[in-house]
Amino acid sequence: MEPLARGETSVWLRQPGRGVVADEAPISLEEVTEARARFVRFEPVLHALFPTDGWEGQIRSELIDYPATPNLLVKCDHALPMAGSVKARGGVYELLCYVEDLALRRGLLAPGQPLEALLSPASLAVLGASRVVVASTGNLGFAIGRVARAFGLQAQIHMSHDAKTWKKDRLKAIGATVVEHASDYTGAVARARLAAEAKGAYFIDDEDSRRLFVGYAAAAAELASQVSARGLEIGAGSPLIVYLPCGVGGAPGGITAGLKQIYGEHVLAVFVEPVASACVFAALAVGGGAPVSVYDFGLRNDTIADGLAVPSASPFVLQAIGRNIDAVVAVTDQAMVRWVRRAWAEAGLRLEPSGASGFAALAPFIDQARTAGLITDDARPVHVVWTTGGSMLPEAEFSALLATD
Ligand SMILES: Cc1ncc(COP(=O)(O)O)c(C=O)c1O
């Protein structure tokens, strides 16, 4: 933890060669299959709710080549519909579960009936009387708030002090209630949980949600089909290495869990955190796999990567996938901003710093992994940087980032 406290780029590596080991609370293949089926069932409904997003209701992103760089692919979740971030997967999935359950309980939907019935006046009236509560550093709240409001649900979004003004303003404009906290993300979650209890509302708990996690895990099959459509063989000697921006751990954790189900030991999951908010790094390096607070190690949780500004990892995520996280790379704010500029100039990708952080982890990870024998000299790895947010950044925000030193 000392290099982190000095603000330096740092790499934590799991012991090489351990393969896939049992986690304390793993998710099952059935759960992920069910999530994929639910997303498909909801496609016509999401398409009807967001007709102008230029899509057919599929929450799906492109896998593209990074220009002029062999074996470097980009999974473009920064351009996901509805949310412009990876939060369109887990956050929205839990919301869809809630909406479907509620409709079944109230008799508005019969089991097996097409979900378009959710859009009937009777159903919308029931949904309009229900409330969801969530806490966020910005993007989770933005995703859930947008989709909840599209269903007519009341949405109360508790934002940590990191959340950007434009995300809050856009939520207010669509009728979500935004509660702004002066606290960090952990504090905002605690307050949101109390507010939900007091109001009898449904709380989407980013620190402890199986549904969120499973929603992210469903992305793995999508990537696998794109990888195989390119004719890329993943296996011994040709590992898939994924670089996943990490806040509380749900998004990278769920995606990793799904990928390990498909590729086993042939996928390496590299979580990427800002140096100042390296909470999964701390949990694995010194916490014995349990959450610890980064403040206890002289870190300040102050970073330009608002989406990743989390001081303590999700206990659930650590139990569900912690033992199988292959590496954590803590990157500096400067490196993330440099990559925001570079990815725009070289590849035309519109990224926020959180969403660009995976690129900043490439060189430090490859260097350490080679030294440790995790990547051998004769290996032919396929690197996938998961870009997780940014396409909806307003022009003024993006230009300001491009002008940042
Ligand atoms: C752009 C972006 N990337 C990645 C993440 C990480 O997700 P998680 O907090 O589930 O680890 C977030 C979280 O808000 C985010 O906003």
Image (cartoon, helix red, strand yellow):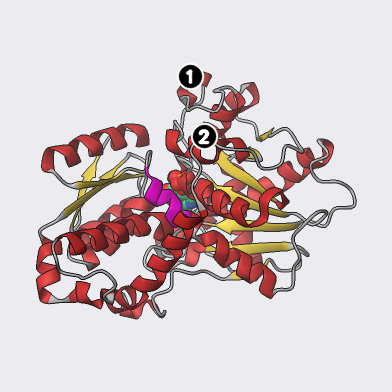
| Residue type at tag 1 | Asp
Look at 21% across and 57% down and name the residue there: 172
Q: Residue 246: percent from the left, percent from the top?
A: 52, 44
Q: Nearer the viewer, mark 2 or mark 1?
A: 2
Q: Which mark is residue 296?
A: 1
Q: Quadrant of residue 106?
A: bottom left
Tell me where residue 315 appears, x and y as whole percent.
44, 33
Label placed on residue 24: 2
Is any part of residue 389 visible from this angle? Answer: no
Q: Does 212 lie within the magenta span? A: yes
Dot 1 alpha-carbon crowd within 10 angstroms: few under 14, some 14 to 19, many 20 or more: few
Q: Is residue 12 above or below residue 269?
A: above
Stretch in magenta = 209-216
Residue 30 position in % (x across, y down): 47, 57
Give the secondary structure at mark 1: helix
Q: Magenta span has 163?
A: no
Can residue 396 be seen?
Answer: yes
In the image, residue 82 sits, relative to residue 190, either above or below, namely: below
In percent of width and height, residue 88 lies at: 40, 61
